[in-house]
Amino acid sequence: MAGLSVEDVPLRLVGESVDAIWVDHTVRLLFSSAATVGLECAFTFGATMGSRTVIDPDGDKAALAPLLRLHTVTVTGARAEGSTLTVESADGSSLSAGPAPAFESWHYTGPETPPNRIIMPGSDSAIWVHGPR
């Protein structure tokens, strides 16, 4: 669909909890609605602006341990603006994933059937929206 931006895709995450966290060369969050967020490049995570750290899913796996605090926590805010995805949680933590120049940095798959999707390869997005926005 021509002319869509990431802001046009409803992120159906607010009010949902993080039911599972998968780690391999990426981090994938599964939400109670069956929506998923995949993080394939470095992103920031922390409880406050001052405590945010950069986490690389393909780097030292021990650095991923702080993400475990998200398990069963409810999402209070979620937005995709430009090339950045931000997810805020009830415990005060927040993660933010921006673009990566040469790789797919993040993606969102909604709970709809068929699912709405955003994939952020480079600094431009690939978007699939099904049905009314």
Image (cartoon, helix red, strand yellow):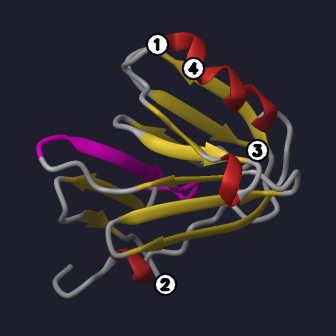
The residues colored magenta run 102-114
> Rounded to the nearest whole Å, what is the CA distance between mark 3 and mark 1?
28 Å
Element assignment for label 1: loop
Asked whether the beta carbons under mark 2 and mark 1 sit within 8 Å of each other, the answer is no
**Residue 18 vertical placement versus 120 (above, below):** above
x, y (%) of residue 93?
76, 51
Asked whether the beta carbons under mark 3 and mark 4 sit within 8 Å of each other, the answer is no
The residue located at (88%, 51%) in the rendering is: 91
Q: In the depicted view, which residue is nearer to us: 116 or 77?
A: 77
Element assignment for label 2: loop
The residue located at (31%, 65%) in the rendering is: 128
The residue located at (76%, 49%) in the rendering is: 47
x, y (%) of residue 69?
80, 32
Q: In the depicted view, which residue is nearer to us: 107 or 130?
A: 107
Q: Residue furthest bottom?
A: 3
Asked whether the beta carbons under mark 2 and mark 4 sit within 8 Å of each other, the answer is no
> Rounded to the nearest whole Å, what is the CA distance between mark 2 and mark 4?
37 Å
Let me know if residue 108 is in the magenta part.
yes
Element assignment for label 4: helix
Query: Mark 4 or mark 3, which is nearer the start of the sequence?
Result: 3
The picture quadrant where one finds residue 68 is top right
The residue located at (48%, 84%) in the rendering is: 132
Query: Label 4: which residue?
Result: 63
Element assignment for label 3: loop
- Which of the labelled discs sits on residue 60, or is there none? 1
- Which of the labelled discs sits on residue 133, or is there none? 2
Q: In the depicted view, which residue is nearer to us: 82 or 111?
A: 82
Report the amino acid beneath label 3: Ser
For label 3, count other residues whose C-alpha is less than 10 Å away and answer few (under 14), some (14-19) or many (20+).
some
Asked whether the beta carbons under mark 4 and mark 1 sit within 8 Å of each other, the answer is yes
